[in-house]
Amino acid sequence: MSEIIRLEKVEKYYLAQKRGLIDTVIKVPKIFVKALDGVSISITKGSVVAVVGESGSGKTTLGKIITTLERPTKGEVFFEDIKVEKKNYFEIRKKLDMVFQNPGTSLNPKMKVKDIVSEPLGHFDEKRVSDVISEVGLSYNEVKNKQPREMSGGQVQRVAIAKSLMKQPELLILDEPTSALDESIQAQVLNLLVDIQEKFKLTYIFITHNILVAKYISDLITVLYAGKIFEYGRTEEVLSKPLHPYTQLLLSSVPTTDTKEVKPPVGDVPSLINLPSGCSFHPRCPFVMEVCKTKEPPLRNYGNNQVACWLYE
Ligand code: SF4
């Protein structure tokens, strides 16, 4: 399978504070948030890659950089081996799309469904709109004249997916597409996404904080922490034999037959303004060693997977 997207040492920094004239005059130093810090990944066509991590891990920033909604501060992105640059954003955006967690905010609440779905086309083609709406399990005649505010969360998310499909994309970035939905609806939307991926042979980058959702939907998994990849490999393998202590921690929060509740992982995500030295996970790590406090572990191949941890040196 050929590669669809490749990130090379991508970094993304945001200015942490609003700066006024006075800050510039008295030379208050700029403070940056490191949302992504040297992420490299190559994704092949037709694969489903889950990106998991807690909030603040950089998942959404990664999605926005791939969709060209954000530009990397450093590093490069290649789409089908072509370097992504401002001059080719338009062409690249035709081949990919992003589905957001809350379609209520990403779709115009005052537009009719038929107009929302036909928007990427630039003109109204009833046959195509009707086909794509059926594809996401909605009845065209029932929903065509409705506005998102008249529909349930699950229906609105289906409309958002239909709008993305209208572009006939090769790559879909799905940012927590089921997190805002009721549990019973989540499974339906997930199953729909699985069917669509198989039918249209799409590539998915599926952003989620829910490791069970990642397990269900993905072939490959990337575990992000404080803007860095900590572990990467085949989902089945990573989740059955997690190498990185952070992946192990995420898995320990998954409900079992004894503990039906999802427990939040122990400890707090560090501040992205002032990351711990060495391995940024060291204050939470039960296996921390002296080296972890001062030296950052690189992401290395280990067996079939990649892991960034001094335990595997
Ligand atoms: Fe834990 Fe050290 Fe591995 Fe970081 S490098 S995860 S602190 S053992």
Image (spheres, rainbow, N blue to C red):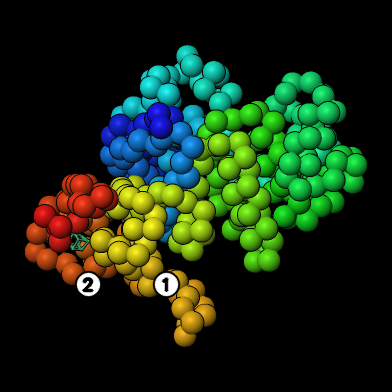
* Pointer 2 with pointer 1, Cβ within 8 A: no
For label 1, the residue is 253
SS at circle 2:
loop
Quadrant housing the N terminus: top left
Instruction: Give me the residue at 63% from left, 47% from top.
Output: 195
- The image shows residue 234, relative to residue 30, as above or below, that is below
Q: Position of residue 227 (x, y in %)?
A: 34, 47
Q: Position of residue 76 (x, y in %)?
A: 34, 27
Determine the CA span between mark 2 and mark 1.
15 Å
- The image shows residue 151, relative to residue 289, as above or below, that is above
Instruction: Give me the residue at 78% from left, 29% from top.
Output: 128
Count residues near mark 2 (Cα–Cα under 10 Å), then give few for <14, some for 14-19, many for 20+. few
- Image-quadrant location for residue 182: bottom right
For label 2, the residue is 286
Horizontal arrangement in the rendering, residue 8 relative to residue 67 (left or right): left
**Label 2 or label 1, whichever comes before in sequence order:** 1
Instruction: Give me the residue at 50% from left, 47% from top.
Output: 206
Q: Is mark 1 within 8 Å of ligand 1?
A: no
Count residues near mark 1 (Cα–Cα under 10 Å), then give few for <14, some for 14-19, many for 20+. some
Quadrant housing the C terminus: bottom left
